[in-house]
Image: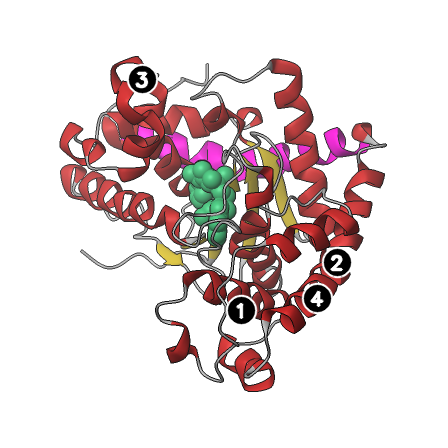
Amino acid sequence: MTETTFTPRVFSGIQPSGGLTLGNYLGAIKRFVDMQGADYQTIYCMVDLHAITVWQDPEALRRSTRELCAGFIASGIDPDQSILINQSQVPEHAQLGWVFNCVARMGWMQRMTQFKDKAGKNAQNASLGLFAYPSLMAADILIYHATHVPVGEDQKQHLELTRDIAAKFNHDYGVDFFPITEPVIEGAATRVMSLRDGSKKMSKSDPSDASRLNMTDDADTIAKKIRKAKTDPEPLPSEMAGLEDRPEARNLVNIFAALNDQSPDAVLAEMGGKQFSEFKPLLAELAVEKLSPISSEMARLMQHTDEIDRILSHGAEQARAITAPILAKTYEIIGMVGPKVI
Ligand code: TYM
């Protein structure tokens, strides 16, 4: 079979459940902005259908979806350069998701560590949707024939599954139809850790608000959370090797590096020898400088939700021009009788 060449296309998504954290910003959104431009067509999604795998208050979900869209735009995603959508307005995601439920194997899904983490001890009571979630995620990506997917480290296993689903589909039907997607997990902040515990990921679901920076935190809150962040009594070393057994210190250096578009080594070359009493105020100042303009722009955009809704409707229209033909072709490949023009 001759290899198909796919148009370079970036897709990624974020759940509109609760607010955005610094982890989402540095691990995902900031990198979405970097990939926007000449090399790729870029599509960014508020994955509302994923959010309902655990119960969401309907009004809160609508608000979070719009706020996430405001977060994308305030961070530099330009609706004239990127397609911005909420998943439920592009029905082909869920339609291809069903097809992939029939491609993915139970054994593959049972290995997903995020399901095990999220379902916890009470897996029997988790929704079927939470279990099937990674198959819908594969559909989100492959319904665009996306070639590159920027994400944080925690999504790596889901992207491996996406590749397995694409390969099995292509193999089972003897086609070269879905691309084998490249995960893009790069930079200093692919896994931003909790400010209270360097062994735990920074997450919006952590019960302690002090464990994370929220994109909507004001300057005082940001400074306070950084001041209280867990560290150790040693000064900063001048090279990353010196941070191997110091997860909290390493986390703060990585955050500084990602916010300042530097490598962690470059940060330590400047900051090596400093105590946390000196480094933390510098980090707080940098975080406020970078995050405050985003949060105030988010607040401004949230005064104009009609405009946000208009951007999402337009995005859905642009998206469907890509997804409808790919779904139609998928249905044809798998043997569905299509509509007949009379
Ligand atoms: P979600 O909503 O949990 O997170 C969105 C993005 O933020 C990244 N992220 C982090 N990166 C670094 N450090 C952290 N502490 C941190 N916390 C979150 C995540 O890695 C992710 O990139 N299943 C996905 C959403 C999704 C998706 C997709 C992503 C649905 N369909 C298709 C890519 C392509 C999720 O729950 O991400």
Q: CA distance from mark 4 to mark 1?
A: 13 Å
Q: Which residue is mark 2?
A: 288
Q: Is mark 2 within 8 Å of ligand 1?
A: no
Query: Of discs 2 and 4, which sits in the foreground?
Result: 4
Label 4, secondary structure: give it. helix
Q: Is residue 325 magenta?
A: yes
Q: Which residue is mark 1?
A: 253
Percent position of residue 339, x then y: 40, 18
Q: Residue at x 48, y 20 (%)?
A: 52
Q: Which residue is mark 3?
A: 128
Q: CA distance from mark 2 to mark 3?
A: 41 Å
Please rate how many residues cluster around mark 3, counting C-alpha atoms within 10 Å: few if below 14, some from 14 to 19, many from 20.
few
Please rate how many residues cluster around mark 1, counting C-alpha atoms within 10 Å: few if below 14, some from 14 to 19, many from 20.
many
Labels 4 and 1 touching (C-beta < 8 A):
no
Q: Main secondary structure of the magenta part?
A: helix
Q: Amino acid at mark 4?
A: Pro
Label 2, secondary structure: give it. helix
